[in-house]
Image (cartoon, grey):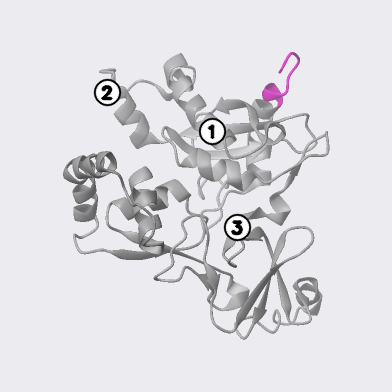
């Protein structure tokens, strides 16, 4: 990531020194062992891509940048017809979803909600004036998403307003920040952060099958090791803890994950825990794993 960041800084500002000799040598090794294989897997000629639907982890974006694939992030809703923001081709800024497209304006409400205005914004829901009035104030659309604008007008999405967790101490926590970073680290598969009206934040975590297979192979352990055994394996739990530490590095201590449980199974559309667009149904997951969540807050919990 350090090579990509230094290279990008040089691209954006020629006065920057760019990657050091050590970083260039490190990149050359990764190019030989990793990056060229990635490009081959995506067809060999892919150089640009657009990402949307969910925030892309900044480090993952930089990883692909170092591999020679520039990923431009965009942001939009069904109610905005198409993209409302997009990363400018010559001014990428990993970690953001870019600038408003021409004819579109973005502002942040007092509570952190992203508001959009422009010709792309819809005129209302079909035969549902009450729902329309709930999201449209004049020309401004209340997106339901939380975000921030930097000094150059780049938008960063930080979560969903309806998903905000309020701890018993009154701390507002956006689970998306933690969950996105958790999912970016193996062996985490899926996860959900909990803690509404609780004294601290916790998480339920599933294991990624491919990451687990690799973990077992490296340690020369049987590939058919039962998942129930792995969810209690101290070494694997230590790997999950590293992912939790990575997630916690992005938030304050009051917002950090204090305890977690590695659970069997997965969240799928078939078991009713994912929407058709593969978003987690939080209430359904909380109901399905109520006992596991209670155990995270049981007597004697830190």
Q: Position of residue 134 (x, y in %)?
A: 79, 71
**Which-is-in-front pick, marks 3 and 2?**
3
Nearer-N-terminus badge (1/3):
3
Residue 68 rendering spot, x and y as whole percentages? 27, 57
| Image quadrant assignment for residue 200 | top right
Q: Is residue 114 left or right of residue 35?
A: right
Residue, disc 2:
218
**Mark 2 or 1, which is nearer the eye?**
2
Nearer the observer, 123 or 19 = 19
Q: Nearer the observer, disc 1 or disc 3?
A: 3
Residue 215 seen in render: yes
Q: Name the residue rendered at 39%, 21% in the picture.
A: 226
Q: Tell me the residue at 36%/57% (across/down).
A: 10
Q: Is residue 183 left or right of residue 290?
A: left
| Magenta region, main secondary structure | loop
- Tell whether position 151 is magenta: no
Seen at 25% across and 42% down, the residue is: 21
The answer to whether any part of residue 223 appears in the image is no
- Mark seen at residue 157: 3
Residue holding disc 1: 205
Q: Is residue 297 magenta?
A: yes
Residue 145 occupies quadrant: bottom right
């Amino acid at each position: 990531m350090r090579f990509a960041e230094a290279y990008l800084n040089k691209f954006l500002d020629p006065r920057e020194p760019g990657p050091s000799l050590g970083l260039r040598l490190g990149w050359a090794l990764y190019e030989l062992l990793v990056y060229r294989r990635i490009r081959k897997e995506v067809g060999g000629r892919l150089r640009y891509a657009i990402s949307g639907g969910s925030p892309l982890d900044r480090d993952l974006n930089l990883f692909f940048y170092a591999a020679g694939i520039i990923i431009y992030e965009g942001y939009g809703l069904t109610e905005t017809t198409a993209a409302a923001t997009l990363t400018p081709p010559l001014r990428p800024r990993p970690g953001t979803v870019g600038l408003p497209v021409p004819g579109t304006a973005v502002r942040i409400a007092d509570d952190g909600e992203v508001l959009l205005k422009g010709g792309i914004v819809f005129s209302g829901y079909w035969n549902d004036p009450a729902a329309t009035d709930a999201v449209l104030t004049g020309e401004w659309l209340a997106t339901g998403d939380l975000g921030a604008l930097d000094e150059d007008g780049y938008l960063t999405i930080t979560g969903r307003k309806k998903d905000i967790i309020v701890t018993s101490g009154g701390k507002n926590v956006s689970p998306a920040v933690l969950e996105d970073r958790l999912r970016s680290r193996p062996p985490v598969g899926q996860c959900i952060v909990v803690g509404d009206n609780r004294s601290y934040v916790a998480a339920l975590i599933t294991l990624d099958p491919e990451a687990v297979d690799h973990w077992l192979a490296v340690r020369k352990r049987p590939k058919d090791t039962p998942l129930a055994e792995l969810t209690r394996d101290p070494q694997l739990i230590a790997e999950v803890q590293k992912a939790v530490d990575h997630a916690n590095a992005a938030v304050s201590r009051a917002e950090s994950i204090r305890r977690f449980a590695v659970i069997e199974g997965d969240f799928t559309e078939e078991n009713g825990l994912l929407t058709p667009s593969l978003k987690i149904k939080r209430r359904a997951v909380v109901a399905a794993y109520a006992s596991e969540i209670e155990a995270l807050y049981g007597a004697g919990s830190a």
